[in-house]
Image: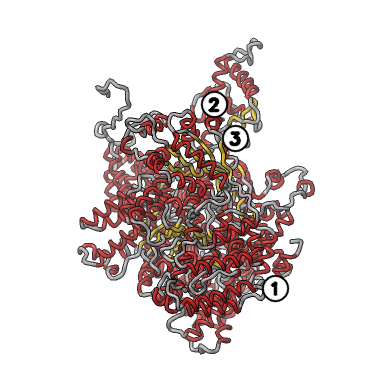
Amino acid sequence: MTALLQHPGYEEQRLQRVAEQLPCRELQAGTLLALMGEPQQYSYPSIFIYGHRASGKSHVMDVLMSELELPNATVSCVECVSVPLLFEQVLLSFFGCDAASLLPRSPSLSDFVRIYKQQCSQSPAKETRYIVMEKSELLRDTDANLLPALLRLQELVEDNVTVILLSEIVWDVFRPNTGCFEPLLLNFPDYSKGELLQILSQDRHPSYSAEFYLSYINILLGVFYSVCRDLRELRHLAALNFSKFCEPLTEGKAKETDTHKLWKNIEPHLKKAMQTVYLREVSSLQWEQMQQMEERESGAVRGLSAHTHVELPYYSKFLLIAAYLASYNPARTDRRFFLKHHGKIRKTNFLKKNEKMSNHLLGPKPFPLDRLLAIFYSVVDSRVAPTASIFSQISSLVTLQLLTLVSHDDQLDAPKYKCAVSMDFISAISRTVNFDIVKYLYDFL
Amino acid sequence: MMESCVTHAPSWSSQQMRGVSANQMPEMKSSQEVVIVIIINMSKRKVKDDHMPVGECITQVQSILRERFCHQKLPEKPQAVEAQHKHLLELLKRTAIHGESNSVLIVGPRGTGKTMLLKCVLRELLGDKEVQKNMLEVHLNGLLQTDDKIALKEITRQLHLENTVGDKVFGSFAENLSFLLEALKKGNRSSSRPVLFVLDEFDLFALHKNQTLLYNLFDVSQSAQAPIAVVGVTCRLDVLELLEKRVKSRFSHRQIHLVSSLTFTQYLERVRTQFSLPGSFPDAKFAQEWNASVKTLCEDKSVEEVLQRHFNSSKDFRSMHMLLMLCLSRVSVAKPTVNPSDLLEASRLCLSDAKADMLHGLSILELCLIIAMKHLNDVYEGEPFNLQMVHNEFKKFLQRKSNSMYNFEQPVVMKAFEHLQQLELIRPVDASSAKTQREYQLMRLMLDHSQIMEALQKYPQCPTDVKQWAMSAFG
Amino acid sequence: MSTSSVSKGCFVFKPSAKKKKRLGLDDYFTDGCEGAENGQLRFRLCQDLWDKIKTDTEVLQDELNRRILDSLLDFTKKCSSFRHHGDWASQMRASEIPTAALVLGVNVPDHDMTFQSLSELLQQAVTPHVASVQAKECGALKHLMKRVLERLMDTVMAVGDDDDEEEECEQTNGQLHTNVHCSLSALCDWYSAKTKKSSSGTPGKKRSSLTLDEQQQPPVVIIFKDLEAFNPRVLQDFILICSRYVGRLPLVFIFGIATSPSTIQRMLPHSVSSLLCIELFQSLSCTQHLATVIDKLILSDHFPFKLNSKVLQVLISIFLYHDFSVRNFIKGVQLSLLEHFHSQPLSVLCCKKKEALLNVMQLSHHNLERVKQLPSFKRYVQKQEPQEQDRLLNDDTHLKEVCKKLMKDLHKYHKNYYPVLWCLHTLTSSLPRYPLGKQIRELHLICLEKSVWENEEYQSAFKLLKMLAKDELITLLQRCAEVLQRVKSKKMKNAVVQLEELLSKFKQLDTAAAETALVVEESITSPVKNLQKKTDLFQLQKTLLEMNESRRAKKLSPFEVLRNEALEFIDDLVKSHLSPPEAQTLSEVCYYSSSATVRRHLNATPRTCIQAALSSPFYYLQNESLKTEDGSVSNAAPDICITYKLHLECGRLINLYDWLEAYTTVVSAAEGNDSDSDHIGKVDDVKHARFIRAVSELEFLGFIKSTKQKTDHVARLTWGGC
């Protein structure tokens, strides 16, 4: 397997070590090394590596850089809140802090290049320098020249430097409309099932045998592979359910060998976990507790998503209900719903058939404050004075993200709102004040 | 380390050769012969002593070719652009020697060797001693000098006038520039030294606030205050439309167009020359062999059609360099030649569809969502959609016919949807949709049928019913 | 004030605070009639009382939060310890940031206190490095960064005391200002330096705080007070950045969530949430919180100050209907306290018994007069014999004596009221359909309003009680006995004694006539049982009826006799002690009654005020000429009132010219020159100007606004004719 990592530029044992640290990524690492060439040789100005999350992009880069001791500057574009920060980090890790301190107050790209040039003329590169940028998709949000400049940095600074961009997004959406220097594209494909198995089985529980853990991972993948290939997520799931898996052993009901019994034991739990895959609702510990709970009253798995119930003051509930009605009913239907004796508005002639999709597919519509209050007063049973606290409740509902203020904040008269809660949320709320909301919803007539 | 490499290099390579020759495709006679030749040579080489070990050679090859492909090392003489080369050289000479002012634009699509041309010319120009000690150069790049203040600072710096300027305050840009040019006047002679301004990414300078820099440069060049030549390099053919009237009027409408009117045969030739070693290569024998192998490579049928494809897509240097670079990266001590398979592999890398790769890595749920979107697109002919609709579509599928898929909870589906958005396989219609709930944000699908279908075919263990669903015409 | 400067410029004159004399708070209390001494006395009483209430409630808050805070502390400790000698599971999540999702409910005003105590506890027990951030102070990522870094380093500066560290902090702060260095890596360096310092010899005073952190690194806790309000984008980026440093920096997040944990998912995409290791913590609901507060604050005789039913009603309804905020509730109590002591001169007597008796003796003549004016006292006087009456009315010393007695009685009344209330609650709270309310506060309200035993819920409750099975009844009675035992007043004492007797009788009963009792029991108890099940009113009445019939039919069993006896006992216990406070003489001294004031202060209705002012100016201006009947506006009213009135009659869009016309007719009618008709409705400039002003005023008040749909029209912003 190390045969993949033959390279004249570097010592055998280093490559050996690299290969060990990069299971199932030797191929990519090999190609990358080949492209990078020997340290003193020129390398391609910019390489763009794309692949899904947790497909080992950053890891491979880190290992290569650290093990082969290549001069590199690894920056995460999330962290570089501002472009100057980026320049600073690069200079810092190439030429030391005195170089970084040469940057003026708010450095422009040309300052950066100028300083870089003069620095590397003082200390010319014997080896290729590498700038690794994680989450490079964020570079598009900074000023437009940065990305094209970085792509041809080698030419701009006349130094043997290679910019390596890592991203989860394909290159096509990066390309500026006037075009730019095309980087060398390199894909990190997602791990195959076998590879996942190999990788996951590496972090085995110390107190159990390797093949036992391997069999566990096998079962896990059998269930989850179809819906989830994210290595990180799978690792999380593995950690989550392992103790459950071992239960029969700890209780002495089964031996490591009889897989069938173990499978029988774990299977239902994995099925439950399936419902909440990707949600990351609970730490393993709380998961345990919940599992115990399930034993007692056997319901669906309740994670964070289950705790959707919110206690609200009485009028806030009605305000929310009113908001919901206002944002999901067409305004013209209000007369029918909320006037006690609406004259001749029969279902037949006010139900428009031409609306092709129900509002619950299209989402909430904005509504003015007046309409909200009008509906509120008609749905709330008792007579309510328009006190200050009613209005303050509206604003607090906005801060709680149950309503959203659509119109601009500084527009004081006739602000517009939207209701931001789901159907079952609102029906739960209306149940508590026994208000039958479905009767008032246009979609359900 | 080199030692070890040397010792076992021949044996390595030879056996590798056999391996290669064994797994060559039958019709590739020529390359087989080459291989044999090489082997013979190698066996010969042991007795000879003036040559270098293979490892050495490969390293040499790598560094030479890399310099060519990655670092755009200038060729001895520009190829296929002799006319332009001559023209430009003429212009610049006039400035450099006779002190005429000039302005010219070099226009051509990316990677057609505009910069190379310019550099060649400069190299030749600076060959002249007189010019070398007389002429000054200022290189500006639209990417770097993003506004005129920065540009002016840069000019000052490149003319080494920081200390002469010191901290003078100038009323206008023009004053400043003219001061700089004045400062270049040699003490006794009234004629000032010619200055060559090279503006790379010229079009970006047109974006500066009322194009002050361009205006002044062209103005100076037109009203011969001081002998300067302004050379703009750009890839935008409509560059003149970008210029303001007053600027345009001051520009001598000289343009040098680089449109590569290459025939495929020329293209092939260029590939060969680009990929073959120079005569100056230390180990002549190896160089011969290498060039021979390259020659045969270029004659190979499969290679030819691959190159044909590339030729059709783009015939410029860059893309070719990228291709060759990829080939080169597969050359190693273990395998000191390039053979067609390398080139095929390389072109595969170049032409691979990235989106398809990404689709391959999606979870089945995400894939289902994409299929649902596709159906929505079919039904509402490309109207934007939101998560609710997609989820609805998906639910319909589940109710109708699904034995393999679970019915996931809303939050889970939401997460999948978010992931797709993060991968920018779907895009929100309006960017300012922070206010609306995520499940109601209107989206567009950034994929087309063929991509989806292809992905489905490639997808590992894709459930059949999902496939059928994707095939089915109606949602 | 003037300056010697000639040149133009703006000068800032700081107001010299010393100059104008501050009149002390207590001076506000001397409302005209009385000498200052009384006012100061009342002020003092008020202050003392409030301080007491304040401290008590704070203690209460703390012990209410105790549980969740402790669990949070454990959580953070666990995190920091796992990081070092962790088991397999925790190694698996070494890359994740431990996060506590702390669900606090929607009563946002109360949260601050919780977070305050949380961060304090953390700093004492777990780590010196705690930073808490709010949404509104970090709109962008760099702000958030800045805040966090500053907070963390400042906290340490506060703790640390050796110089080099101080200067280091200085220069890091210096860097903070140049936004460039404001990155987590800086924090990391600082942290490692810090921990090195603390692990090596630390000054003694610091060791006391961080004893358990000596060996291991203390975690760095970041508290996000209001998660919902944060900008998701900012939060995501911050978490992403933090996760890169989680190896070097033991971070712990605490999310303060108002609504529900699912907001985390709504805000964070999977790529981010998968970097967190979330644990959920639920604080107890604010209604429970309120219940406990009421028990401690309202339903106890520790505080002489009381609220009458209306005021309490207002406060509670504000809580339930508007904001679930306990803090505001207590504020309300404070307000009424202040109002009471301020408005009621006799509130000098509203204090501890002994003090009250003293104050009675100090009462001045004026105040005694006030006492005589008290309705409750009047009622009392009427009850007395004639000569007693005129003694009361004329002889101050005698009056004082009587007042002393009455005050004593009042205190006794309170002493007994609450235990009995609890008894009644224990008996009735478990009944089907809660005739007297589930919460004790409801029962309390009923009792405050009028005498309980008169309303029919009470009757029905007792009917139900009469149907209780023996064992249930006994348990209830025992609980009552426990309640009463805690009180030490002789009335309650012998009440307890009687109860014990009853209970013992019950005991004997089942030894004596077990089998009959049995028969009786299930014949009797079964209906109650199925009452529990089907609980609609009709069923209830039906069963009640047949119960009575059955009772009439057969003679009472000994158990029933006993039960009735017990219930009678309870009944007259109630009758004797739960009489409404208004009945008590001098109750006005302790009971604050003006609910209107409280409502006006706590639950203001600005809109209606404005509308009232505009529609009936007399209400505020008190000018006879404005007095009108049937809500119409007299044409002598201010212009704005007239325009307002007129605009009420219009639709959504108001034609300005018509409006002007109408206005001028009204006004000119007011001027009385309606004799010559040509003059009528003629628009002269003055009227025009007045009209314009009135309209602009209306616009300013937000009743109308100019519209783009029609140029000469304005849009109405208020709906209906209100």
> Looking at the picture, do discs 3 and 1 lie on one chain?
no
Secondary element at image label 3: loop
Q: How crowded is mark 1: few (under 14 residues within 10 Å), some or many (20 or more)?
A: few
* Residue, disc 3: C717
Q: Do the residues labelled 3 and 2 touch (CB within 8 Å)?
A: no
Q: Which of C554 and A185 is in front in this view?
A: A185
- Where is residue B195, by image quadrant? top left
Q: Say which chain tag 2 marks.
A: C
Would residue B432 be visible to someone looking at this image?
A: no
Disc 3 crowd rating (10 Å Cα; few below 14, some 14-19, many 20+) is some
- Residue type for callout 2: Ser
Q: Residue C304 carries which label?
A: none
Mark 2 vs mark 1: give the one in front. Answer: 1
Q: Is mark 1 on a helix, strand or loop?
A: loop
Determine contact: label 2, label 1, CB under 8 Å.
no
Q: Quadrant of the C terminus of chain B?
A: bottom right
Q: Which chain carries label 1?
A: B
Tell me if residue C407 can be seen.
yes
Under mark 1, the amino acid is Asn
Q: Mark 1 points at which residue?
A: B403
The image quarter containing residue C378 is top left
Q: Distance between the residues labelled 3 and 2?
A: 14 Å
Mark 2 = which residue?
Answer: C696
Residue occupying the point 79% across, 46% down: A349
